[in-house]
Image (cartoon, grey):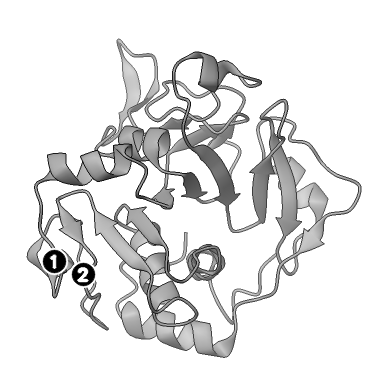
């Protein structure tokens, strides 16, 4: 398991998520871990990464120690290049200008479908969740979508209780056949592992495990059977530099407190 004396699980996910974002690309992020991961990428290896927020904010400057609590508040628009309407922003996305979407979720299933609506029966849910927001638009229209979440059996389920944001639906060509002909679910990043998706079946596939984690740890904490290749890569632990910048960005650990 991760060395919690050096970094916690949320910090691990934030750092490894930030590494997937490339310089000179455009990322559409939600609040929480996606936001701080994108801000960290900007201040390390991707200084020209352009961040978009669903409230209608293009390429703001994320202040050290001044992370917005919402993607719709004034701090989220600090030094933004442009403040279009949300409708105009989503039209840019639908026209293919967004390289990465970045989401979290309460439940995810073996085909990358996300649930952020409710847990349990729709008529009498156990838990009501925030809903879609821009999540459905992001996952259906961005070129690649990254999903960051904590790794637990109750989150990684065989079938989500409700599809808020469609991944590969029932696998194979189901996403394409449903009319979602653009975009792909690129990676799922957790505090245990990184997953990708099989090109043919669209089933979640283990790509890498983190320092101190073994394949059995992943299997035991997953509510379905992912594809396990013969050789599984191992990620590199967060560096002191990455952790220093991350903690400067979020000194009160609003987004990176232990899960």
How many numbered marks have been drawn onto this rendered protein structure? 2
- In the image, residue 196 sits, relative to residue 170, either above or below, namely below
Give neighbour class at mark 1: few <14, some 14-19, many 20+ (Cα, 10 Å).
many
From the image, tell me which residue sits under label 1.
Answer: 77
Residue toward you, 240 or 199: 199
Which residue occupies 42% across, 41% down? 105
From the top left corner, tell me how far across and down residue 166 is, in percent.
45, 27
Residues at marks 1 and 2, CA–CA distance in whole angstroms? 5 Å
In the displayed structure, does residue 203 sit left or right of residue 51? Answer: right
Q: Are marks 1 and 2 in contact (CB under 8 Å)?
A: yes
Label whose residue precedes the other's in the sequence (1 or 2): 2
Q: Label 2: which residue?
A: 60
* x, y percent for residue 100: 43, 52
Between 246 and 23, the residue placed more toward the observer is 23
Q: Is residue 105 above or below residue 70?
A: above
In-front residue for pair 128/58? 58
Q: Classify 10 Å Cα crowding around label 2: few (below 14), some (14-19), many (20 and above).
A: some
Under circle 1, the secondary element is helix
The percent coordinates of residue 66 (x first, y second) are 20, 77
* Tag of residue 55: none
Q: Quadrant of the N terminus?
A: bottom right
């Amino acid at each position: 398991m991760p060395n919690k004396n050096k970094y916690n699980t949320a910090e691990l996910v934030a750092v490894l998520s930030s590494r997937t974002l490339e310089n000179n690309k455009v990322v559409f992020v939600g609040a929480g871990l996606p936001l701080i991961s994108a801000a960290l990428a900007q201040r390390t290896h991707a200084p020209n990464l352009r961040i978009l927020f669903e409230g209608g904010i293009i390429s703001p400057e994320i202040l050290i120690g001044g992370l917005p609590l919402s993607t719709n508040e004034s701090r989220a628009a600090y030094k933004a290049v442009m403040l279009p309407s949300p409708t105009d922003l989503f039209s840019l996305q639908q026209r293919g200008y967004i390289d990465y979407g970045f989401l979290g979720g309460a439940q995810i299933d073996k085909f990358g479908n996300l649930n952020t609506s409710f847990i349990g029966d729709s008529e009498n849910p156990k838990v009501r969740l925030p809903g879609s927001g821009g999540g459905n638009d992001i996952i259906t229209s961005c070129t690649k979508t990254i999903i960051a979440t904590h790794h637990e059996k109750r989150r990684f389920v065989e079938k989500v209780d409700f599809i808020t944001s469609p991944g590969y639906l029932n696998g194979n060509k189901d996403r394409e056949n449903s009319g979602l002909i653009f975009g792909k679910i690129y990676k799922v990043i957790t505090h245990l592992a990184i997953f990708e998706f099989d090109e043919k079946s669209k089933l979640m596939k283990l790509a890498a495990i983190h320092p101190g984690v073994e394949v059995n740890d992943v299997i035991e904490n997953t509510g379905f059977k992912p594809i396990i290749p013969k050789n599984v890569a191992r990620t590199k632990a967060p560096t002191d530099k990455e952790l220093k910048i991350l903690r400067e960005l979020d000194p009160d650990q609003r987004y990176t407190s232990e899960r």
